[in-house]
Amino acid sequence: MEKRKHIVILAAGGLPTHHVPLRALHEADMVVCCDSAYDDWNQENGDWKATIPYVVIGDGDSLTAADKHTLGDRWIEVSEQDYNDLHKAMEYATKQFTIHNSQFTILGATGRREDHTLGNISYLVTFAEEHPGADIEMLTDYGRFVSMTGSRTFACFPRQQVSIFTMNPDKPIYSTGLRWPLDGFHARRWWQASLNEALGTEFSLRTEGHLVVFRTYEPKS
């Protein structure tokens, strides 16, 4: 059986420092770097980096002519302005690697400008709609974001912090395994289903809409 590929998409919110996202970066089979994150990628060093193929993609407004010359065929220009560089990077990655035999991890999508952070997190729903069945996760220095619709069961641990954000406030949310159950709850505002807590080793969510789910790496102290 062909080995499952792990593709990291590096955005410009700042390189992570926590060991979980760093391990994902260091063990990637391919890095697709947004052009606005190229300076961050350039500053990384170590033996691990020399073994990872990478490309830089975007509209080029964050690169100098010298950067583009240095990158050569690693530089991929996509000039359209309807979508941001994160979307362009995901489009490239999903065209190069089959979604059913790949894992896509987004790093550097949070931090720095808050409007970029909110936009990047919400892109998880767009990616789920555009690439049904793809394994797409966003890692930060504090936890992991995924998008879901329908029903899903998550592995967890007691006192893991769980926040749920709905893109469809008209659709009810149901849960099991959380300290504060959601039994047909309509989250009209983003904060209303945040800051929940896992009770055991798994919890489940169900909705007809689209959710973004955040889970911390560490239990609440």
Image (spheres, rainbow, N blue to C red):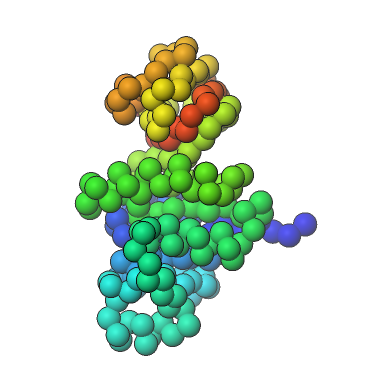
Q: Residue at horizontal 30%, vertical 85%?
A: 65
- The one nearer the camera, 16 or 68, is 68
Asked if residue 62 is positioned above or below residue 194 in the image, the reply reads: below
Residue 47 appears left or right of 79: right
- Residue 72 image offset from top left, x and y in percent: 44, 85
- Residue 197 image offset from top left, x and y in percent: 40, 22
Q: Residue at horizontal 48%, vertical 71%?
A: 54
Res 68 quadrant in image: bottom left
Q: Quadrant of the C terminus?
A: top left
Q: Residue furthest left?
A: 113
Q: Report how many numbered discs are placed on residues in the image.
A: 0
- Residue 161 image offset from top left, x and y in percent: 39, 27
Residue 91 appears left or right of 218: right
Q: Residue at horizontal 43%, vertical 78%?
A: 75
Asked if residue 54 is positioned above or below residue 90 in the image, the reply reads: below
Q: Is residue 7 visible?
A: yes
- The one nearer the camera, 71 or 179, is 71
